[in-house]
Amino acid sequence: MKLNRGISRPYAKSEKMKLAYIIFNGITWVDFVGVYEPVSKLKSLKCLPELEWDICSFTGSITDIFGLELKPSIIRNSLADYGAVIIPGGRGAWELQFDKDFIGWIRTAEPAKFKISICTGSLILGAAGFLKGKLATTHFQEYENLKPYCKRVLTDRIVEDDNTITAGAVSASIDLGLFLCDKCAGPEAAKEIRKRMDYHG
Amino acid sequence: MKLNRGISRPYAKSEKMKLAYIIFNGITWVDFVGVYEPVSKLKSLKCLPELEWDICSFTGSITDIFGLELKPSIIRNSLADYGAVIIPGGRGAWELQFDKDFIGWIRTAEPAKFKISICTGSLILGAAGFLKGKLATTHFQEYENLKPYCKRVLTDRIVEDDNTITAGAVSASIDLGLFLCDKCAGPEAAKEIRKRMDYHG
């Protein structure tokens, strides 16, 4: 896995961080859970015991295209006070990138320190204007669609450019989760969590 | 990835198959979604358009240890009529293996053609008696705990023994999902789904 880490701005361990995971209809659940699982382990393994997060949505009932339903913890709240906003992908992202109300809500994340996306979630980050002038990536079938939103699309599995971090297709969510573990709690924590997940990607 | 496939009994493509995904409190969501995602693609990509499944639980509200809640599609139903029962792992499995009511419910899956588990879900399969005389695997930290339930614990990522298929820790769920895609719809379908998920594990 190639990482653009030259411009990494490490997250200070001592800083309290609250994350917002965005979920929406037509989500690909692996995109979300692939990040959520390793990052949550930072809390349960006491690497970052104070880590907190919300599962945020713009509408009340969230399902994937097959009807699998997950309950958001908070609905249509301002995203301004989170340390990081994490947007997974899924078929729903294709339409939501053009949904003014939804994108208006995503834009409330402007003050958030980090804007993070996986797969087609990058189209949502892009539509919100957060990838302007940035290097970014997305699902490999969506490179052309991401181009108008950013400076340049890279084919790397994870792309970090200042305060934006974008990841590629579906399974790259796990790589991103481990990348965030490293960034938030250091390489030893990330290594331990990778081991416990038995992940060799 | 080493697979014990010598004793594989391929699933006939023409046979209608309904799956039961078991969810429970203290589940590791990746264990479930890692299988669900690639297998569901068999339906959305029309490899197996008639594939159906239920998300089954013994109690109504299902959360992981952090409170993330997913809605089952059916509660405390008989598992006898499913083609396959798929049991993920998670901390909840440690207690549930000794919960007579829960294990009694799992035992209703006895007539199901395939009994499948991921990670510590193997302890539940084992407690239900489905691994008796079988080769099996589980999370690498649980090998000793699985021993009493089966003939022999293997350290392989996926172990298939007649009608039981068991997988290792967390991320092995994706491997298992792709393994089931291969088994149900053939190697070309599995290859295409692996590609779309950009999975290199």
Image: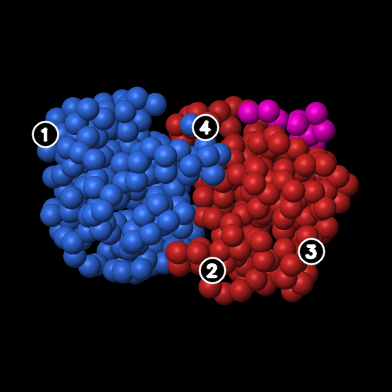
Chain colours: A red, B blue
Of labels 3 and 4, the one closer to you: 4
Instruction: Name the residue carrying label 2.
Output: A62
Residue A195, given in percent of the width and then of the height, sits at 48, 29
Left-right relation of A21 to B158: right
Res B162 quadrant in image: top left
Rounded to the nearest angstrom, the CA distance separating label 1 from label 2 is 42 Å
Q: Nearer the viewer, mark 4 or mark 2?
A: 4
Q: Residues within 10 Å of mark 3 (few under 14, many from 20)?
A: many
Name the amino acid, label 3: Arg
Q: Which amino acid does label 2 sit on?
A: Ile
Q: What residue type is labelled 4?
A: His
Residue at the spot of label 3: A107
Numbered disc 3: what chain?
Answer: A
Residue B191 in the image: x percent, y percent?
A: 45, 38
**Position above or below: A165 against B6:** below
User: Mark 4: which secondary structure?
Assistant: loop
Query: What whole-number distance in Å separates the C-alpha atoms at marks 3 and 2?
Result: 20 Å
Residue at image x 52%, y 32%?
B200
Q: In this view, does A117 lie to the left or right of B101?
A: right
Of the 4 image quadrants, the one containing the N terminus of chain A is top right
> Where does label 1 land, which residue?
B133
Q: Nearer the viewer, residue A37 or B101?
A: A37
| Range drawn in magenta | A1-11
Q: Seen from this angle, which residue lies furthest right?
A: A133
